């Protein structure tokens, strides 16, 4: 493998360290690219416990993400967080943040919630902010909720959908996360017409399950807005390359090891209260360390550390490991030079992890091409299904009968 190509994430099937637990369908805002059917459904604790057990039996999980709807609207969320944590699985949650109160956050933290991904973007309709033209206008709201989340000892990250309309703002969004000490990760889902993908494929396998073709005429065609606003990871890579950033790893598609469906970027920022900051963007040479960590975890039967959270000490260690493990004197010198800034008065080091996800497409042979082993698989009807397609494969009427 070319040393400077991003590393192909090796986990497949049982080794995939992450899954999504959908706790409800109910939501309190509208997202333009939402792929959920948003019925007024809330799963019982008994059902959720069973789903957690099932997901944990299907995958060697390091982390599980609570999703909805809006998970905060589930009245017994702390209990389910406690249950997942008791299994040694890190709990993360997707939330639009609108209903997050100090009381709830305290309960979630006590129950073991480690991280909240705040989904806030400019194509949402929400009660706590009016319509905006630009992503940057949402930064005060993002900051305000991030302050509340982190004040309870929960790590806060930003999640958003990237549209063609907002692609020109990608660099600004990345800079905002890099420069904002309250935000840990950036998770971006590229806009995609998920419904059209499911409705236009010819029938076939998705995550080892066979689905019949779903008839196009029932769908009334695709969503023209989402089609026109779809973004690819290739476009993302091009924008970030201009900022000197390269993904160190990627998740391939189920059809081709070369097709990048998730992109992973790692950076560290040293910032001082005096106003200066320095950045270190990891290159694909970091893949050497990831490969070793993965092999080591596998040998010990442990999950791959999918959702690690690095404090100050581990951040310094990671930069050192990157420099040493790169096998390249220039990279090592760069990492050491960067770390020297940590010794300056008032300096702090922060980890920034950026992940981009490109949704499924229909290949020329009529089959769905999706992320390999779908790291965001969820449970439906006792089977693993990609969360982005689950409500299209199991539309409400059919699901109601099954429930
Ligand atoms: S296939 Fe899985 S990982 Fe890929 S976008 Fe859909 S849910 Fe996410």
Image (tube, grey):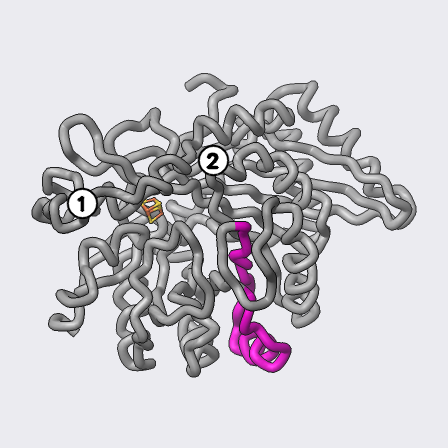
Distance between the alpha carbons at the discs numbered 1 and 2: 23 Å
Residue 92 visible: no
**Is label 1 in a helix, a strand or a loop?**
helix
Is label 2's Cβ within 8 Å of ligand 1? no
Residue 110: image quadrant is: bottom right
Please tell me the numbered disc located at residue 199.
Answer: 1
- Quadrant holding the C terminus: bottom left
Span shown in magenta: 97-122
Tally of marks: 2
Q: Is residue 87 left or right of residue 327?
A: left
Identity of the residue drawn at 44% across and 77% down: 77
* Between 176 and 253, the one nearer to me in the picture: 176
**Is label 2 in a helix, a strand or a loop?**
loop
Residue 72: image location, x then y, percent = 48, 73
* Between 389 and 110, the one nearer to me in the picture: 389
Q: Is residue 359 left or right of residue 92?
A: left
| Residue 234 part of the magenta-drawn span | no
Residue 286: image location, x then y, percent = 55, 31
Q: Name the residue under label 2.
A: 164
- Quadrant holding the N terminus: top left
Please tell me the numbered disc located at residue 270.
Answer: none
Residue 54: image location, x then y, percent = 26, 66
Crowd class of label 1 (few under 14; some 14 to 19; many from 20; radius 10 Å): many
The numbered mark, 1 or 2, whose residue comes first in the sequence reads: 2
């Amino acid at each position: 493998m070319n040393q400077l190509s991003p590393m192909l994430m090796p986990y497949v099937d049982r080794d995939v360290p992450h899954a999504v637990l959908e706790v409800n369908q109910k939501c309190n805002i509208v997202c333009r690219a939402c792929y959920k059917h948003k019925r007024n459904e809330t799963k019982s604790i008994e059902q959720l416990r069973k789903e957690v057990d099932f997901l944990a039996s299907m995958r060697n999980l390091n982390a599980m993400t609570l999703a909805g709807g809006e998970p905060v609207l589930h009245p017994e969320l702390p209990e389910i967080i406690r249950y997942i944590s008791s299994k040694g699985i890190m709990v993360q949650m997707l939330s639009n943040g609108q209903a997050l109160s100090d009381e709830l956050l305290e309960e979630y933290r006590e129950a073991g919630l480690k991280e909240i991904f705040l989904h806030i973007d400019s194509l949402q309709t929400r009660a706590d902010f009016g319509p905006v033209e630009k992503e940057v206008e949402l930064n005060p709201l993002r900051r305000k909720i991030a302050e509340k989340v982190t004040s309870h000892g929960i790590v806060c990250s930003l999640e958003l959908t990237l549209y063609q309309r907002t692609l020109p703002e990608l660099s600004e969004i990345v800079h905002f996360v890099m420069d904002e000490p309250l935000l840990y990760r950036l998770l971006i889902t590229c806009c995609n017409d998920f419904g059209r993908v499911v409705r236009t494929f010819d029938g076939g396998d998705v995550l080892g399950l066979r689905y019949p073709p779903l008839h196009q005429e029932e769908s009334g065609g695709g969503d023209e807005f989402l089609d026109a606003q779809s973004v690819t990871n290739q476009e993302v890579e091009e924008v970030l390359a201009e900022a000197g950033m390269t993904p160190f790893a990627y998740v391939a598609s189920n059809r081709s090891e070369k097709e990048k469906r998730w992109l992973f970027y790692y950076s560290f920022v040293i910032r001082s209260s005096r106003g200066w900051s320095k950045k270190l963007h990891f290159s694909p040479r970091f893949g050497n360390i990831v490969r070793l960590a993965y092999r080591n975890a596998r040998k010990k039967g442990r999950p791959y550390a999918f959702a690690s959270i690095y404090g100050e000490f581990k951040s310094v260690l990671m930069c050192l490991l990157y420099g040493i493990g790169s096998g390249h004197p220039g990279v090592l010198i760069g990492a050491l030079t960067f770390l020297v800034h940590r010794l300056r008065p008032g300096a702090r080091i922060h980890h920034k992890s950026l992940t981009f996800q490109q949704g499924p497409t229909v290949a020329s042979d009529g089959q769905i091409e999706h992320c390999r082993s779908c790291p965001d698989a969820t449970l439906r009807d006792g089977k693993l299904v990609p969360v982005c397609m689950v409500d299209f494969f199991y539309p409400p009427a059919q699901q109601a009968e099954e429930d």
